[in-house]
Amino acid sequence: MIPDQKDDALFQYLLRLGDNTLVLGHRVSEWCGVAPALEEDIALANTALDLIGQTQMWLGYSAEVESKDRNADELAFHRDVWDFRNLLLVEQTNGDFGKTIMRQFLFDAFNVLNLRALSKSSDKRIAEIAAKSVKEVEYHLERSRETVIALGDGTEESNKRMQAALDRLWPFAGEMFVIDDVDTAMFDSGIGPDLAVLRKDWDAIAIPVFNAAMLTKPDSDFAHQGGKSGNRHTEHLSHMLATMQFLPRAYPDARW
């Protein structure tokens, strides 16, 4: 791969990492002040803060690789929907608390495995960011795993809602492991992990949790795709960006 192509693949890869945490961080932050309990309100707000902090590092490095005099804030607030490279899973609406926690668990299990692998990346900057982030994400996974089990193996109503959440979100989970040219380029360069291996490890985390939570894993292997390539996003992302990006777009270069 020639240098320009490698840099573009690295830029796209970093956008995926940063956009995942940006979009999910904003989604989770929407619970601030309206969560079902004070403890959950604080916990979700802290999770959102962790994710946005990771976004700053990923998009900051993305901007450096791009070399077009943009920074992390400009990448976050001045791109249109088709320029985003996040997974379709993370842009799904919060729905009820069960759906939010299920979405969090599905992504947390992937994120932990991905960051552990990236902490050994041949790209030292990526390895450093991953090593800093993985400790936070391991806690996210511990918490979302325990909450999925508690709600799934709780009341009849909570089990029903968690099963509905799993059924609704399952078709979006497969995109995490879809391998494209960017993933292949990163793996060949020793930068990114083999997503096929991550899928096996993810199943080893997720399936026992579903069993403990008295939930039935959907049989379908169908996976919605297009988010991480930018070819297709749901309408939910554009609605979210309209809110998230309003202030910087309405008042460009504004300073406090």
Image (cartoon, helix red, strand yellow):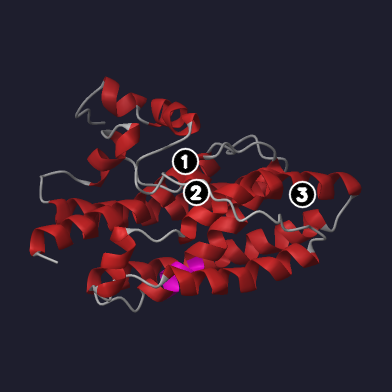
Q: Secondary structure at mark 3?
A: helix
Q: CA distance from mark 3 to mark 1?
A: 24 Å
Q: Pointer 2: what residue?
A: 48
Tell me the residue that label 1 is attached to.
26
Q: Report the mark closest to the observer, 3 or 2.
A: 3
Which one is closest to the eye, mark 3 or mark 1?
A: 3
Q: Quadrant of residue 106?
A: bottom right
* Disc nearer the start of the sequence (3/2): 2
Report the Cα–Cα distance between label 1 and label 2: 7 Å
Q: Is residue 119 left or right of residue 150?
A: left
The main secondary structure of the magenta stretch is: helix
**Side of 12 where 42 appears, left or right:** right
> Which disc number belongs to residue 163?
3
Kind of residue at disc 3: Gln
Q: Is residue 220 magenta?
A: no
Contact (Cβ within 8 Å) of mark 3 with mark 2: no
Residue 126 is situated, as x and y percent measured from the top left of the image, at: 29, 68
Identify the magenta region. 112-116
> What amino acid does circle 1 point to?
His
